[in-house]
Image (cartoon, rainbow, N blue to C red):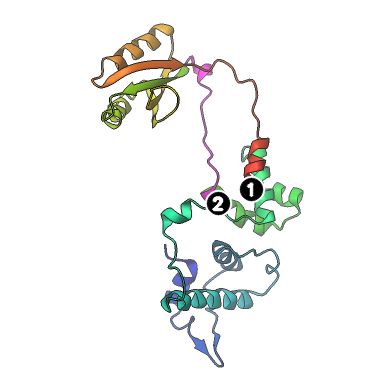
Amino acid sequence: MVSTLDSAVKKYPGSDKPRDGGKPVAAKFALTKDEILSELENMSINTNSIESLSDKVLLELLTGLKNLTSQFYQGKRGRPPKSEAESALEPPILSNADKKILKSLIASSCNVSSLTLSRELNIPLSTVQRRRKRLEASLIETVYQLKLDKFGWRNATLFVATASTSARNIGAEMMSWEKEVVAVKRCMGENSADLQIDILFKSNRELCDIIERVKTIEGVTNVSWSESIETLGRNTSFYERVIQG
């Protein structure tokens, strides 16, 4: 991934090279302050205490850190940068501001304006907007769902046990059932099922027909099902534990 700073260097050649006593020359107009702070945050720098610095000082800091990191690895003085797979296994580094914003977003199901967050959390609006954009892109899933019961539809989950080599092929076949199947997932647990199929139907008869149809697929050894009939409550406090680490 090409960073915003890298793009700026390409646009303004020589802006990353030291001049006059080793100080890098800032690439004028190449980066906004929010972009510089975002770059620093991507390097796991807590920007809370440096947001008040000038654009020039922040850009010099970012350029210096980039150069230092590059020299460190080019000199083989340590471990090479981690792969994307290795980085994905590590928990994200969150500042106090990140945690506050995340908690508010989860509590409101992301249905809150950045201006409201800024006022309630006493965090500058530009900071909220920048961090919210990053957090929503990397740590939050937001999905709009129809209230199916209002349209006369019901949904259920099929748990399908298959021969050991058949799960992926059966899953691919069922994804072609566009009128009935919403999602197909691999699963594991105490029962023998290794596929979880989310389906839509309108009557018990339709449900039975779908189950019988699944049983006729070559490689299917067993089918069980479950239908949620009522949501008794949701516990969002668990997410606070996750955010706090």
Residue sticking out furthest to the bottom? 20
Residues in magenta? 138-153
Mark carried by residue 91: 2
Say whether residue 149 is left or right of residue 83: right
Query: In the image, what residue occupies the spot 41% across and 59% down?
Result: 83
Location of the N terminus by quadrant is bottom left
Mark 1 lies on residue: 245
Residue in the foreground of this view, choosing between 112 and 232: 232
Q: Are marks 1 and 2 in contact (CB under 8 Å)?
A: yes
- Mark 1 or mark 2: name the one nearer the start of the chain: 2
Q: Residues under labels 1 and 2: Cα distance?
A: 9 Å
Quadrant of res 220:
top left
- In the rendered view, tell whether residue 113 sits above or below residue 1: above
Residue sticking out furthest to the front? 190
Q: Amino acid at mark 1?
A: Gly
Q: Is residue 200 magenta-colored?
A: no
